[in-house]
């Protein structure tokens, strides 16, 4: 094998390695996006299950509520927001809403929870 063939093979190998590195980076970004979407869907699914359970139980309690004093229950929206924040998502108003916090606290989100 002469020098030119060796250098050509090395250049092809380097090109292939660079392409593999770019593909790996793209796949990593896609995996992160899919994991974030999966977590968001799981949280939404859990919230929907809770709402369904509450609506089923409230239907059975409706008959009893006419007989007893009507007491307002707090809405679960604050609890849902707190759960989303705990899962690592922004709950503050604006363009960050629903995006992953990457473990960092957000003062705007904390303000929403404190109101």
Image (spheres, helix red, strand yellow):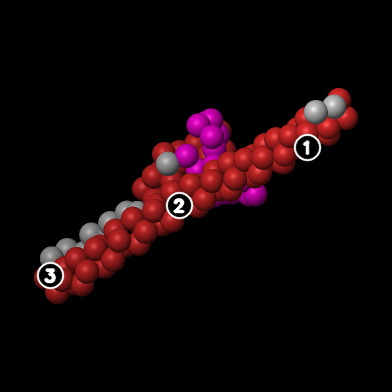
Q: Where is 104 relative to 48, above or below? A: above
- The label number, if any, that marks residue 12 in the structure image: 1
Q: Which residue is mark 2?
A: 38
Residue drawn 13% across the image and 65% down it = 68
Can you give x and y, in whole percent of width and height, for residue 109 in the image?
52, 40
Q: Where is 56 relative to 104, above or below? A: below
Can you give x and y, in whole percent of width and height, for residue 34 in the image?
52, 50
Q: Quadrant of residue 92?
A: top right
Instruction: First in sequence, mark 2 or 3: give its number.
Output: 2
Dot 1 and dot 2 residues touching (CB under 8 Å): no
User: What range of the chain is rendered magenta?
Assistant: 88-106
Residue drawn 54% across the image and 34% down it = 102
Q: Which residue is mark 3?
A: 64
Residue drawn 20% across the image and 72% down it = 59
Classify 10 Å Cα crowding around label 1: few (below 14), some (14-19), many (20 and above).
Answer: few
Kindly report which numbered mark, 3 or 1, lies closer to the viewer in this rendering. 1
Instruction: State how far apart marks 3 and 1 are (Cα).
Output: 78 Å
Instruction: First in sequence, mark 3 or 1: give its number.
Output: 1
Can you give x and y, in whole percent of width and height, for residue 43 in the image?
39, 52
Count of numbered circles in the view: 3
Classify mark 2: helix, strand or loop: helix
Classify mark 1: helix, strand or loop: helix
């Amino acid at each position: 094998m002469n020098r030119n063939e060796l250098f050509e093979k090395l250049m092809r190998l380097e090109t292939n390695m660079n392409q593999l590195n770019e593909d790996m980076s793209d796949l990593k970004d896609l995996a992160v996006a899919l994991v974030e979407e999966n977590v968001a869907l799981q949280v939404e699914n859990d919230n929907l299950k809770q709402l369904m359970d509450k609506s089923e139980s409230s239907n059975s309690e409706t008959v009893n509520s006419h007989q007893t004093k009507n007491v307002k229950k707090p809405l679960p929206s604050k609890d849902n927001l707190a759960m989303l924040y705990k899962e690592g998502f922004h709950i503050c108003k604006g363009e960050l809403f629903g995006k992953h916090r990457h473990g960092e606290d957000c003062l705007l989100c904390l303000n929403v929870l404190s109101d």
